[in-house]
Image: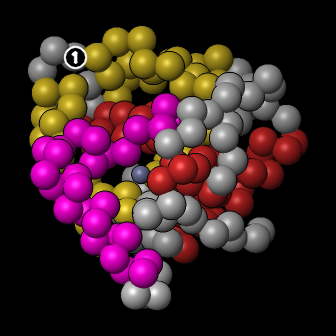
Amino acid sequence: MPQIPIITLPDEKTLREVSRPVAQVDAGVRRLWDDMLETMYRAPGIGLAAIQVGVPQRLLVIDLSKDGEEKKPLFVANPEIVWSSPAQSDYEEGCLSIPEYYEMVTRPSEIRIRYRDRQGEPMELHATGLMSTCLQHEIDHLNGVLFIDHISRLKRERVLKKFQKAQKLGKL
Ligand code: ZN
């Protein structure tokens, strides 16, 4: 399975695109999921949206299993958040498109989503803890939203500048 290059800052143009739903979960979608999963494992990361590899389709892969544990990939197509808890939690988030930058983000603690699974079947999932955070982070990607949009403007501008400067210096 080939790995696909992950788009990182300061290339915001692609990352800001709103992704389209897939008409159906077919062999092409499953192949893309497999390539995304391989790319995410190698990075390594726990979640990846298709737009991060340049494909504007509403597709995610997530795997929260720890090193050495059995892999538990979750394949998600066309996710929709149908309920969010009023209670919120803070998690320190990172993103494969914003390497080596971590910041606390506040989001609803629990969510319920509807999506299509690897067989194209409609599914519902009630997510808590890290799964809830990860799903909200990845679904944001499908809407062109990055986790740095949830932090202060000052911090966001600082991180964007850092990546622009690194690119200018040829360090990316
Ligand atoms: Zn991300």
Q: Badge 1: how crowded within 10 Å, few (<14), some, or many (20+)?
A: few
Which structural element holds mark 1? loop
In the image, which residues are magenta? 142-168
- Residue at coordinates 55% horizontally, 62% vertically from top-left? 7
Front residue of 53 and 108: 53
Rendered image quadrant of residue 30: top right
Main SS class of the magenta portion in the image = helix
Residue 94 shows up from this direction: yes
Residue 166 is left or right of residue 17, and the answer is: left
Between residues 127 and 147, which one lies in front from this camera angle?
147
117 vs 113, left or right, is right
Residue drawn at the location 62% of the way across and 47% of the way down: 50
Asked if residue 166 is among those painted magenta in the image, a careful observer would answer: yes
Given residues 58 and 172, the one toward you in this image is: 172
- Mark 1: which amino acid? Ser
Image location (x, y in percent) of residue 144: 48, 38
Instruction: Point out the residue furthest to the top here.
Output: 82
In the foreground, 144 or 37? 144
Q: Is residue 34 magenta?
A: no
Residue 49: horizontal and vertical position, in percent?
55, 47
* Residue 91 picture location, percent across and down: 17, 47
Residue located 66% across and 41% down the image: 56
At x 66%, y 53%, the residue is 54
Q: Is residue 77 above or below residue 7?
A: above
* Residue 63 shows in the view: no
Q: Answer above or below: position of 22 versus 38.
A: above
Looking at the image, the residue that sits furthest to the bottom is: 170
> In the rendered image, which quarter contains the N terminus?
bottom right
- Residue to which mark 1 is pinned: 85
The image shows residue 125 at horizontal and vertical percentages of 45, 23
The answer to whether residue 106 is left or right of residue 8 is left
